[in-house]
Amino acid sequence: MKISTSQLVAWDDPLSSAITSNGRNYLDPLSEQAPTESSEREKSLLPLEQQAHEQLAPINVQDKRVVNAATDINQLAPFKYPWAWEFFLNANKNHWTPLDINMAQDVNDYHHKLTTEERHVYENVLAYLTTSDILAMRNIGLAVMEKMTAPELQIYQARQVYEEALHTWTYQHCIETLGLDQSEIYNRYRVIPEIHGKITMANQRLSSVLRPDIDLHNRDDLEQFVHSYLFFAAVFEGCWFYNGFSPIFALQRRGLMKGTGEQLQYIMRDEVMHCAFGLRVVRQLLSEESLSLDPTRVNDMWEEAEAAEQAYARFLLSEPILGYSAEDHIGQFRFIANRRAKQLHLAEPFPGAENRLPWLDEQASMRKEKNFFETRVTEYQAGAALSW
Ligand SMILES: [Fe+2]
Ligand SMILES: [Fe+2]
C-alpha cells in the first residue's frame, strides 16, 4: 500500500509532524479544544493507518502534570520537569553496596568496646531504621509512584525504591555481620512503644493514600495525598532519617563502629536527595493544582512528630552516651524541622531551635570518593567468582 509522505513521522524531528493532516496543531494548546462534530466525522472517514498516525503525534509538554495528566505518560522527553531528570543523574553518582565496606572492626568494637548503653543505642537505632526503610520503600513504590503522571518523576522514584531496598539490605548486613538476634531486632518496633509510635504515625499516613478508591480528582483526596507526601519527605526522610543516624555518627566520631558509620553516610546522602526531591514535588503539586497547605494540619504534623521523636530519644538515650544525649537529639530534630519548613516557605515550627550537632551536615556532604577505595572490601568479588 502506498503511504503519502505527509503520513510519515519525522523521527529526527518528531515535533515537525505535530501539525497533522486534519490541521490540528498538537503544539498549540488552543487547537486542543474538543473536536467539533464535523471534524470528528472527517476523522472517522480517514483511512485506518492515518488515524493511527494521529495517535502517534508527540505530546504537548504543557499537558504533563505531576498527577492527573490527560496525556501519554510513556514519553520521557520533552521534559517538563528537567530537575527530576537531574535528580536521577545525581542519584547514580552515589552508588555502593553494603558489601563494599569493611565491617571487621565493628564486630570487635560491638563485642569488646561498646558499653551496655552504647549497645542499647546501636541496636535500637538499627531496629527503628530497618522498619522505617521498608515503609519508605512501600510509600514511594506503592502509594506515590503510581499516582505520578510524568515519566521523569517516576524514573527518579524508581531509583528511590531501589535505594530504599538497598538501605534495608545495609541494616540487615550490619545485623548479620555482628551476629545479632535477627528476629528479636526486627520485632522491636512492635513491642517497644517508643519505636512503635513513630512507625504508627507513618503507617497511618501511608494507609490513608494506599486506599484503592483514592481519587486525586477529588480535592479532599488530593489534599490528603499532598499532606501524606509532605510528611514522608519533610518529617520521615528529612528529619527522622537525617537525624536518625546521628547517634551512630557520634560513635563513629570517637573511632567506634566506623564501618556502620560509613554505611550510614552513604544512606544519608540518598535520604538528603529523597527529601529534597519530595519537597520539590510537593511545591510543584501545590502550584499546579492551586492548592495551599493547611497551616493547622501542618502544625499538628510537626507537633505530633516532635512528641514521637521526644519519646524515642528518651527511650534510646535514657542513659546518655559520651558526646550524645537525648537533649542533643531532640534539639537537632527541631533545628532540622525548621530547615525543612523553610524549604517549603512555611513558618518555622520551632523558633529559636539551635544547631546542637554542627558536625551532622558534614556527615551528609563529606566527599567519600577520595577514600572510598581505601576502605572498600574487594575480597567478596573474588569469593563470588569462585563460588559458582
Ligand atoms: Fe532509605
Ligand atoms: Fe528515603
Image (spheres, rainbow, N blue to C red):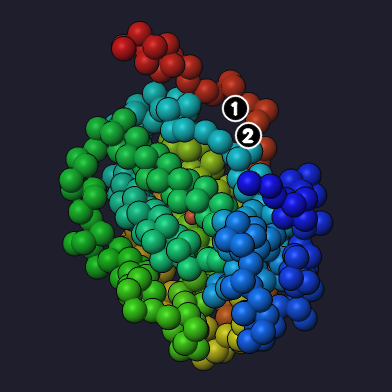
Q: Is residue 153 left or right of residue 201?
A: right
In this view, 24 is above or below 318:
below
Mark 1 and mark 2 in contact? Answer it, CB < 8 Å: yes
Residue 343 is drawn in which quadrant? Answer: bottom right
Q: How many marks?
A: 2
Look at the numbered disc 1 and give the secondary structure of its residue: helix
Which residue extends farthest top?
Answer: 386
Query: Residue 82: in sight, yes or no?
Result: no
Q: Is residue 342 left or right of residue 249?
A: right
Residue 131 is drawn in which quadrant? Answer: bottom left
State the image coordinates of residue 226 (x, y, percent, origin top left): 51, 77
Q: Nearer the viewer, residue 113 or 22?
A: 22
Amino acid type, label 2: Lys
Q: Nearer the viewer, residue 40 or 197?
A: 40
Amino acid type, label 1: Phe
Q: Which residue is mark 2?
A: 368
State the image coordinates of residue 65 (x, y, percent, origin top left): 62, 71
Which residue extends farthest front?
Answer: 1
Q: Residue at 21% across / 42% down in the picture?
A: 182
State the image coordinates of residue 134 (x, y, percent, origin top left): 35, 54
Q: Which residue is mark 1?
A: 372
Residue 283: which numbered mark, if any? none
Q: Residues within 10 Å of mark 2 (few under 14, many from 20)?
A: some
Q: Is residue 332 left or right of residue 9?
A: left
Q: Residue at 35% across / 36% down in the picture?
A: 174
